[in-house]
Each structure stands twice: as C-alpha cells, then as structure tokens.
Image (tube, rainbow, N blue to C red):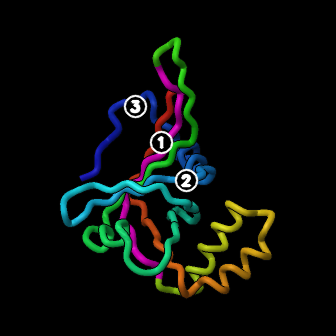
Amino acid sequence: MLHEMRRKDKLLSAEDTAKILENGVYGVLSTIGEDGYPYGVPVNFVYTNDVIYFHCATGKGHKLENISYNNHVCFTVIGSSNVIPEKLTTNFASAIVFGTAAQVADDDEKSAALMSIVEKYAPEHIEAGKKSVEMKLKITDIYKITIDQLSGKASR
C-alpha cells in the first residue's frame, strides 16, 4: 500500500525530484527479509530512463536474499542537507522511490547500465570504464528498480 505525502507544502515537482535522483551520490536501498527485519544499505546507483540501476557482486548477499524473498523496495536519496542549529531545523531535499527490484539478465542492458554508472561516477575515465565493464560483466550483477511511486520533499 502506497502513501500520500502528508506535508504537501514540502512536495517537490517531478522535475526537481528527478534532479535529486540524477545527481545523488548514493541512495539507501531498503528491503525486508524473511525474518521480518528491514535492511537498509547505501549503494551507488544511476537513474536513467525512469528506472534506477545498481550493481553488486554476483551471488548471494543480505540485500539479494531479501530481494529474492520480497522484491518490493524503498530507495531514498538525500539531495542536500544543511542543519541550522539556531533555528532547531534542517534544510533538506530528498527523493523517495517505492518500486520493485529485479535482476537484469540481458547483457546489453547490463553493459549499458554499468557504462551509465561509469559516466556518472568517473566521467574522466570512460576508456578505463569500458575495459572494466568488458572484464567484469560476467561477475557483476545489475539490478533494476522499476518505480511504482516517486516523491520529492524539501524544506528550504
């Protein structure tokens, strides 16, 4: 069940929310495990074509076990944060995604997603990134989050 934002006065436009996702350095991927416990882990990511991609080593890990159990995820990106102690408040901008995560099987899509990650995090090393993607494509998993609900919130 998805929820509406309570504080409509802090709601960001779709365009401003997309900018947070495009420019965010990391996001926190939140999953739920078979044991009933939530798990949030920071990951590098790229937002492109209205989906979020993140990479990880192949095999099992806590987040992958949880996604196998329940592929509904929440993904949070903090675009900015500035504590204002004298006013006992914080100025911030954030984006929250609710969606479903799935492993990408197609090598072309995996390669494109990895290159998008290289372009985002290492734009001055594109050639080295291409070589790395070729070498590590088979030992890297790519997951895609298909967005069901996206909202941005800011206090400025």
Residue shown at 25% from the left, 63% from the top: 33
Residue shown at 42% from the left, 61% from the top: 147
Compute the Cα span from label 1 to label 2. 16 Å
- Residue position marked by numbered label 1 in the rendering: 152
The numbered mark at residue 8 is 3
The quarter of the picture where the C terminus appears is: top right
Q: Residues within 10 Å of mark 1 (few under 14, many from 20)?
A: many
Sequence order check: which comes first, mark 1 or mark 2? 2
The boundaries of the magenta stretch are 89-104
Mark 3: which amino acid?
Lys
- Residue position marked by numbered label 2 in the rendering: 26
The answer to whether residue 100 is magenta is yes
Q: Does residue 27 show up?
A: yes
Percent x, y for residue 19?
Answer: 60, 48
Mark 1: which amino acid?
Gly
Nearest the eye: 59 or 12? 59
Residue shown at 50% from the left, 59% from the top: 43
Mark 2: which amino acid?
Tyr
